[in-house]
Amino acid sequence: MNKTLTIQQRNDVLRSMVKLIAAEKVEILNANKLDVNNYNGADLAMYDRLKVDDDKIEGMMLSLQQLIADVDPVGKELYHFIHENGLKITNKSAPFGTVLIIYESRPDVTVEATGIAFKSGNKILLKGGKESINSNLKIVELWHKALKKNNISTEWVEYLNYNRTETQAFLENPTQKVDLIVPRGGEKLIAFVKQNATCPVIVSGRGNNFIYVDTEADLELALKVIINGKTSKISACNAVDKVLINSNLPNNALFIKKLIKKLIEFKVEIFGDAKLSNFDNVSPYKNEDIWNEEFLDYKIVIGSVNSSEEAIAKINKYGGGHSAVIITKNNETANLFMESTDCAAVYQNASTRFTDGGEFGLGGELAISTDKLHHRGPMGLQHLVTNKWFIYGDGQIR
């Protein structure tokens, strides 16, 4: 398992997997139907992520086809130096080794994330949630078929069918070497993994994204971007939870009333700060902790700020480090906001819903990292590698 498979071998497995998903689509949908019927939770976002339909199947196959078309991320020369003593020193990209992906509810992760980790030369350990067990086991069965078809060991993709206690024990004292853990899910899952893991963890999935409406905003554009960010997919980590409106915005009250009306049309529950909770259909919130909260639901908080600097400070204090937007026609104001806001992705006049590996041209994504090490934002194929130094000499000593 230490030897990296050739790019031909890795691509052949991915090609086989595309064909198997197409051939066994009905079986995948049937397995998923069992999971959906068994799910009795009230979590709307969890349910949305759990359900597999024809579109999601197409998305799974497309993500693998894009991976096949992408260049090999392993063995890229990152740096080269010839020492004065003749040593030839090269730094190249290299696989991590074994990547453990812990995730909730999303069977498409079992395809997309596994494909990314596999093409980047890593062995994959999968720990999915109990709510998607039938879907995940069916997809892992297909991965094993794809590997066997190409005379490659099924050990490259392994499913850990553990309960919470067993998972904790594995994280604290792994029964096999694990080089990197990527938790994908809610804050409780991320906190659980970080607390118990004994190897590096890339934090992924927390949103709590902000939109700031500046004094020089195009107000129709602002409405369109806010409504899209909040309502187009509430289960996504790139959805919007908070809106800050500059108190000096011309026609401020009229814009706020229009925004409230639009949000109510989409059945969004609206909370406001001391200034904005005076508007009809806006509820005051109980305490400031709500600014920290990621909703993954039809809820939003709207607040008033007196300047861009105040908006930046609020976002940097409460935001999840994922995505933030400024709505303004003033490019200078936008640049200051974008450079000063501590997020993986910053936008001028566009929806946060684009923070996604596919939308950023990466094909798919393993995760959207809100950490700064070792990568930030959507993690695609080219990011799931570490590096290694190769030094060639002819007897040099120091």
Image (spheres, rainbow, N blue to C red):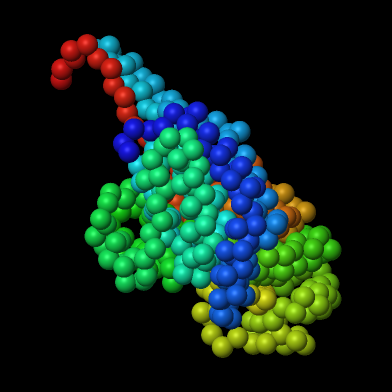
The foreground one among 323 and 231 is: 231
- Image quarter where the N terminus lies is top left
Residue at x 29% of width, y 61% of height: 170
Residue 58 in picture, x, y percent from top left = 68, 50
The number of numbered discs placed on residues in the rendered structure image is 0
Q: Tell me if 244 is positioned left or right of 256 in this view.
A: left
* In the rendered image, the vertical position of residue 52 relative to residue 266, given as above or below: above
The foreground one among 102 and 256 is: 102
Residue at x 48% of width, y 52% of height: 141
Task: Tell which residue pokes out farthest to the left in this image.
Answer: 398
Q: Tell me if 347 is positioned left or right of 159 in this view.
A: right
Q: Tell me if 231 is positioned left or right of 66 in this view.
A: right
* In the rendered image, the vertical position of residue 152 relative to residue 296, given as above or below: above
* In the rendered image, the vertical position of residue 275 relative to residue 310, given as above or below: below
- Image quarter where the C terminus lies is top left
Give the image quarter of residue 74.
top left
Q: Tell me if 210 is positioned left or right of 190 in this view.
A: right
Residue 182 in picture, x, y percent from top left = 43, 55
The foreground one among 259 and 298 is: 298
Does residue 375 appear anywhere in the picture? no
* In the rendered image, the vertical position of residue 123 relative to residue 92, given as above or below: below
Residue 253 in picture, x, y percent from top left = 80, 77
The foreground one among 115 and 151 is: 151
Residue 247 in picture, x, y percent from top left = 72, 73
Does residue 216 appear anywhere in the picture? yes
Residue at x 43% of width, y 25% of height: 77
